[in-house]
Image: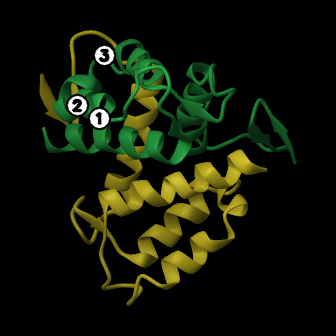
Chain colours: A yellow, B green
Amino acid sequence: MSAVGGYCSWAEPLTDVERAIETVINQFHCYAVKGQKEYLTPNEMQELVVQKLPHLGKCVGPLDEKIECMGDPDEAKLEFGEYWDMMGDAAKGCRRK
Amino acid sequence: MSAVGGYCSWAEPLTDVERAIETVINQFHCYAVKGQKEYLTPNEMQELVVQKLPHLGKCVGPLDEKIECMGDPDEAKLEFGEYWDMMGDAAKGCRRK
């Protein structure tokens, strides 16, 4: 097992759910430029939401507010766990519709 | 916008990240039989991990322990938010590898 692009690789193919989780992980890495894959800034998170969650982002009014509350748009740090929680908010927001 | 199978549908196609989040949501609905899409039992969660996270499940030792700590394997209730958190644990577990 070896880590490729920050994600494990296995001999056998991943399941659909594993590929889905990998996709969500990879977006974090793609947008976490300033934090070198360790954190997102509010600006980077906002960019991700606009570009990658054009639909889900609409289900979740507070997502924008949460990003604003994170602090300095270019200095505050959103680590992977918090990013995953925000993706969960988007998922919950959409489930309730 | 209308909810289809518990997920919103839009005119334009979803992005890859939105489809990924939809996949993780849909697994919850698939396995949440007893709770009629509202919650998973520990047994159902364990079944999901074994069948759908054959690789990621290995990155996360405590996932099994967490499921065991949930209480009665057929009565305890794991709601969507807790399910999403556990998927996040699997994702974090793999990111560290």
Residue A20: give its label.
none
Frontmost of labels 3 and 1 is 1
What chain letter is assigned to the residue under label 3? B
Give the CA separation, mark 2 to mark 1.
6 Å
Instruction: Work out whether residue B10 or residue B63 is closer to the camera in this orientation and state it.
Output: B63
Q: Earlier in the sequence, mark 3 or mark 1?
A: 3
Instruction: Work out whether residue A70 or residue B33 is closer to the camera in this orientation and state it.
Output: B33
| Element class at badge 2 | helix
Q: Which of marks 2 and 3 is nearer the N terminus?
A: 3
Residue B41, x across and y down, in percent: 49, 26
Residue B24, x across and y down, in percent: 53, 33
* Circle 3 residues within 10 Å: few <14, some 14–19, many ≥20: some
Looking at this view, name the residue that lies furthest to the bottom.
A72
Residue depicted at 59% across the width and 55% down the height: A90
- C-beta proximity under 8 Å, tags 3 and 1: no
- C-beta proximity under 8 Å, tags 2 and 1: yes
Frontmost of labels 2 and 3 is 2
Q: Quadrant of the C terminus of chain B?
A: top left
Residue B65: give its label.
2
Instruction: Work out whether residue B87 or residue B64 is closer to the camera in this orientation and state it.
Output: B64
Return the residue at label 1.
B69
